[in-house]
Every structure is written in C-alpha cells, then in structure tokens.
Amino acid sequence: MKYIAILHKNEGTAYGVTLPDFPGCFSAADTLDEVQANAQEAVELYAEGEAFTPPVPMTFEQVTSTSFVNRLDILIFVLLMCCHP
C-alpha cells in the first residue's frame, strides 16, 4: 500500500520521517535515497510480534489537517509492504 510520509529536515541534520498512519512510528535517513528502506524497516519493527491489521492509508487532506505537518515539511508517498499475516 502507499502511505504518506512526512519529511522534516533542518540544516545539518538527517531527514526525520514521520508515518502518521502508524501512531508513534518514525524513522530517519541521511539521504532521500534511504527514506523508503528506513520507513519500511520502521513499520516492520512497529508491527513486529503484534496482531496487526494494516491501516487504510490517510488521504492527503487528512494528513495535512493533522498537527504532524507544518508549513516547512515535505510530504511524499512511500510504498510499504506492510505486515503480512
């Protein structure tokens, strides 16, 4: 499924990655090329050992109306292979 990831970046820092569909799940990446794999790993660890049903992805409008997003964030879609039973 495709989920929206919120990227946060300050000068001199890694990219912070927040996944609003997965409460409390976040990651970081030194480069944009690493965002996908690191987000995937974060979701796998988030669901590890739990009975977990993947959430229905939030819409762009739902994500942008949350407190997760500020005007300097970048929203991207990430394709996650999520939580096979």
Image (spheres, helix red, strand yellow):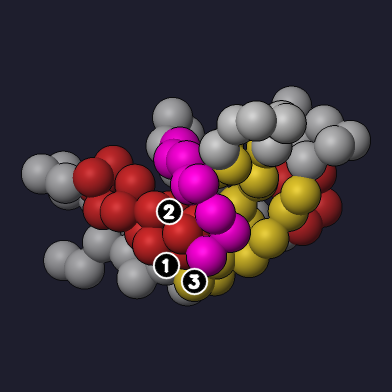
Disc 2 to disc 1: CB gap under 8 Å: yes
**Depth check: 16 or 68 in front?**
16
Q: Secondary structure at mark 1?
A: loop
Q: Secondary structure at mark 2?
A: helix
**What's the mark number on residue 39?**
2
What separation in Å lies between label 2 and label 3 (alpha carbons)? 9 Å
- Indicate whether 65 appears above or below 29: above
x and y percent of residue 81 in the render?
34, 71
What separation in Å lies between label 2 and label 1 (alpha carbons)? 8 Å
Disc 3 to disc 1: CB gap under 8 Å: yes
Q: Is residue 33 left or right of residue 64?
A: left
* Quarter of image, res 31: bottom right
**What's the mark number on residue 79?**
3
Q: Is residue 83 left or right of residue 18?
A: left
Q: Which residues are magenta?
A: 26-33
* Quarter of image, res 24: top left
**Depth check: 13 or 52 in front?**
13
x and y percent of residue 59 in the render?
71, 59
**Depth check: 2 or 85 in front?**
2
Q: Which residue is mark 1?
A: 80
Q: Could you tell which of marks 2 and 3 lies nearer the N-terminus? A: 2
